Amino acid sequence: MNVLVTGSTGFIGSRLCRALVQAGHKVRAFHRPASTLRLLEGLEIEHALGDLTQPETLLAAMQGIEGVFHAAAWMGGNDSGRLYAVTVEGTREVLAAARKAGVRRVVHTSSVAALGVPERGAPSLLNENHTWNIPPEYYPYGYAKYLAEMEVQKAVAQGLDVVITNPGMVFGAGDVHRQSSSIINLVAARKLSVAVEGGINAVHIADVVEGHLAAFERGRCGERYILGGENLTYLELLQIIARAAGVPAPNLVLPAGLVRALGRLALPLQNFLDLPVSAELFHLAGYNFHYDLRKAQVELGLAPPRPVEEAVAEALSWFHAG
């Protein structure tokens, strides 16, 4: 099968390219001319140069393509205009080009961030039915991903076959865009020695890639599928990383209210502060971003997720190899 991968030089996209080549598919990697090709080295693939904000390059890249994996994302920091242009408008253009080119199926890489936040005090895990529920400025990345999913639903209504995947927080070898800011490197360098209240779902990159391939083969049109791993508190995650890195494990947990208050103070100064995450994300302290994985496991036939320890160890080894 002839397959196009957007975001092909990134973490998820490059691993998808490798998996697709290994499965015998002909892969066309869509990327900007200036993109680093480090993660695609040694692969027998075709390169298609272009930009999500240049629709004519997308349409040219789609010619003769049967399947598209849209894994491109804006990873450039706090540029809200660029975030919207790439994540929302770029997705709209990818879907329009796929429809014009007669692509058989698209798998759209979204994020669990698009599901919004859990209601306070709610004990249940979030699932694919949850929807956006907080002010956009509290989580710009999540809101952009939510809007991109709305573009997917519009395309589905117009007859395009699209399946949505929603990965959790992805770990493993090859996270090139987060190399300097990775929570793994921050903990390993002992620059992050405290946790905050709340939690996250951490997933191995191999499970995310397998989930994408299964979504293409077995996913239902217009449906979301959470591709997750282990539901952990932030403290548990930091302790796993610390053990793997051989550094003292954090044991202090800051109250969520304090962190949110600090975020409001830090927001106007964040360009001058060395913060582990963007000040906007301080609003999310205290939430347990934990997810129900049953839909993807049942409908896509996914195996139980790999241990987070395995993903962290592989990431550390890759980071150290430089």
Image (cartoon, rainbow, N blue to C red):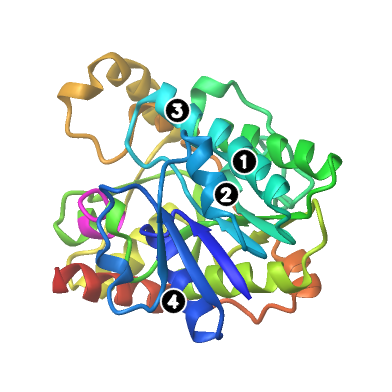
- Mark found first going from the N terminus, 4 or 2: 4
Query: Rounded to the nearest whole Å, what is the CA distance between mark 3 and mark 2?
Result: 26 Å
Check disc 2 and report the residue beneath it.
111
Secondary element type, mark 3 = helix
Secondary element type, mark 2 = loop
Query: Rounded to the nearest whole Å, what is the CA distance between mark 1 and mark 3?
Result: 23 Å
The amino acid sitting under disc 4 is: Arg
The amino acid sitting under disc 2 is: Ser
The amino acid sitting under disc 3 is: Gly
Query: Rounded to the nearest whole Å, what is the CA distance between mark 3 and mark 4?
Result: 43 Å
Residue situated in front as seen by the camera: 262 or 312: 312
Percent of width and height locating residue 286: 50, 38
What residue lies at 24% left-to-right and 65% top-to-bottom?
Answer: 38
Looking at the rendered structure, the number of numbered marks drawn on it comes to: 4
- Mark found first going from the N terminus, 4 or 1: 4
Q: Quadrant location of residue 188?
A: bottom left
- Which one is closest to the eye, mark 3 or mark 4? 4
Residue 18 has which mark? 4
Asked if marks 1 and 3 touch (Cβ < 8 Å), the reply is no
Q: Residues within 10 Å of mark 1 (few under 14, many from 20)?
A: many
Query: Rounded to the nearest whole Å, what is the CA distance between mark 4 and mark 1?
Result: 27 Å
Task: Pick the quarter of the image with the N terminus.
Answer: bottom right
Q: Residues within 10 Å of mark 3 (few under 14, many from 20)?
A: some
Asked if marks 1 and 2 touch (Cβ < 8 Å), the reply is yes
Secondary element type, mark 1 = helix
Check disc 3 and report the residue beneath it.
257
Check disc 1 and report the residue beneath it.
114
What residue lies at 50% left-to-right and 20% top-to-bottom?
Answer: 137
